[in-house]
Image (cartoon, rainbow, N blue to C red):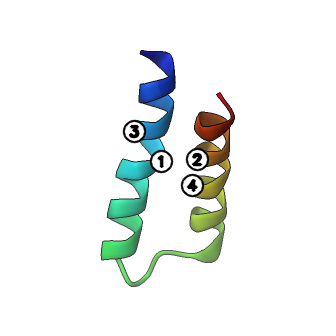
Amino acid sequence: MISATLLLIPTTLLIVAVNNAATPYWAFVLIAATAGFGGGN
């Protein structure tokens, strides 16, 4: 359950970030870091 939630969070954030053209680079780096935690689990 925790692993699925950790993967769901960056997926949702990525959908929001890609739909907004003004998303800064650091936001994508933060999303990638959260995806790394979920994938590592």
Instruction: Give the labeled residue for mark 4.
Output: 31
The residues bearing labels 4 and 1 have C-alpha atoms spaced at a distance of: 5 Å
The residues bearing labels 1 and 3 have C-alpha atoms spaced at a distance of: 6 Å
Instruction: Give the labeled residue for mark 2.
Output: 35
The residues bearing labels 4 and 2 have C-alpha atoms spaced at a distance of: 6 Å
Q: Provide residue 28's location: percent of width, then percent of height.
A: 58, 66
Q: Which amino acid lies under the numbered mark 4 shown in the image of this protein?
A: Ile
Pointers 1 and 3 in contact (CB under 8 A)? yes
Q: Residues within 10 Å of mark 4 (few under 14, many from 20)?
A: some
For residue 12, above or below residue 23: above
The residues bearing labels 2 and 1 have C-alpha atoms spaced at a distance of: 5 Å
Of the image marks 2 and 1, the number of the one nearer the N terminus: 1
The residues bearing labels 4 and 3 have C-alpha atoms spaced at a distance of: 11 Å
Res. 10 mark:
1
Pointers 2 and 1 in contact (CB under 8 A)? yes
Q: Which amino acid lies under the numbered mark 1 shown in the image of this protein?
A: Pro
Of the image marks 4 and 1, the number of the one nearer the N terminus: 1
Q: Which amino acid lies under the numbered mark 2 shown in the image of this protein?
A: Ala
- Snapshot quadrant of residue 8: top left
Pointers 4 and 3 in contact (CB under 8 A)? no
Mark 1 element type: helix
